[in-house]
Image: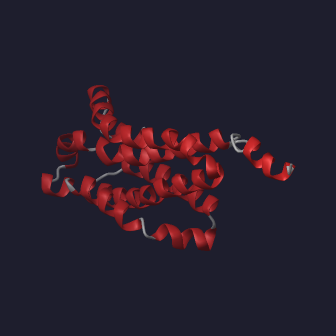
Amino acid sequence: MNTRTSLPSQGSDQLPPGTWKIVSVAAVGSFMAQLDATIVNVSLPDLVATLHAPFSHIQWVVSGYLLALALTLPLNGWLVSRLGGRAVYLWCFGAFTLTSGFCALAWSAPSLIAFRLLQGMAGGLLAPMAQMTVARVAGRQMPRVASAMTAPVLLAPLLGPVVAGAILSIASWRWIFLLN
């Protein structure tokens, strides 16, 4: 009997060390990027009043984010091949957090729209990078950790309006962005 062929089947049920830590960080990043896709919708009337801009301009706070998010998706492969997966993910996570802060500090509709475009670009790179990082770490055990990655991404758009409503009932629209 060959012992070499029996070893992989015994060890195949083990996740590499640190996998759940990486999955947790990646899931949080993906969750926040998806949450921001819907959390701002509830605050649009407040933004119109506070920033003294027509609704047609404020609408770009949501549309610009989604457009930037979608347009940056094709850059993932190119950036990973140039900079490496870990560097791109960490940069995206930092950029997303920083641009969220800038959104909270926006002084006008054009500044908020510009910051949301930047936030959407970082968010568009963040979710696929998280999935790729988890897939690399989990390897053949990806089905085992897939639900930990998928559930937050699916729940975030549902929770966005609820979280926004709760925040707006006690604080200003700026706290929606500071949540990140």
- Residue 105 is at least partly visible in this image: no
Q: What residue do we see at 58% from left, 43% from top?
A: 23
Q: Find residue 178 and report its horizontal and vertical position in percent.
A: 42, 40
Q: How is the image coloured?
A: secondary structure
* Of residues 143 and 79, the one drawn nearer to the viewer in this rendering: 143
Left or right: residue 101 compared with residue 92: left
- Residue 24 is at least partly visible in this image: yes
- Looking at the image, residue 118 lies above or below residue 40: below
Q: What residue do we see at 22% from left, 49% from top?
A: 51
- Corner quadrant of residue 25: top right
* Number of marks: 0
Left or right: residue 84 compared with residue 26: right
Q: What residue do we see at 57% from left, 62% from top?
A: 88
Determine the residue located farthest toward the front in the rendered image. Answer: 1
Q: What residue do we see at 42% from left, 65% from top?
A: 73
Q: Find residue 144 and report its horizontal and vertical position in percent.
A: 57, 41
Which quadrant of the figure contains the C terminus? top left
Left or right: residue 15 compared with residue 131: right
Q: Find residue 81 and report its horizontal and vertical position in percent.
A: 60, 72
* Of residues 48 and 152, the one drawn nearer to the viewer in this rendering: 152
- Corner quadrant of residue 165: top left
Q: Find residue 134 and report its horizontal and vertical position in percent.
A: 58, 50
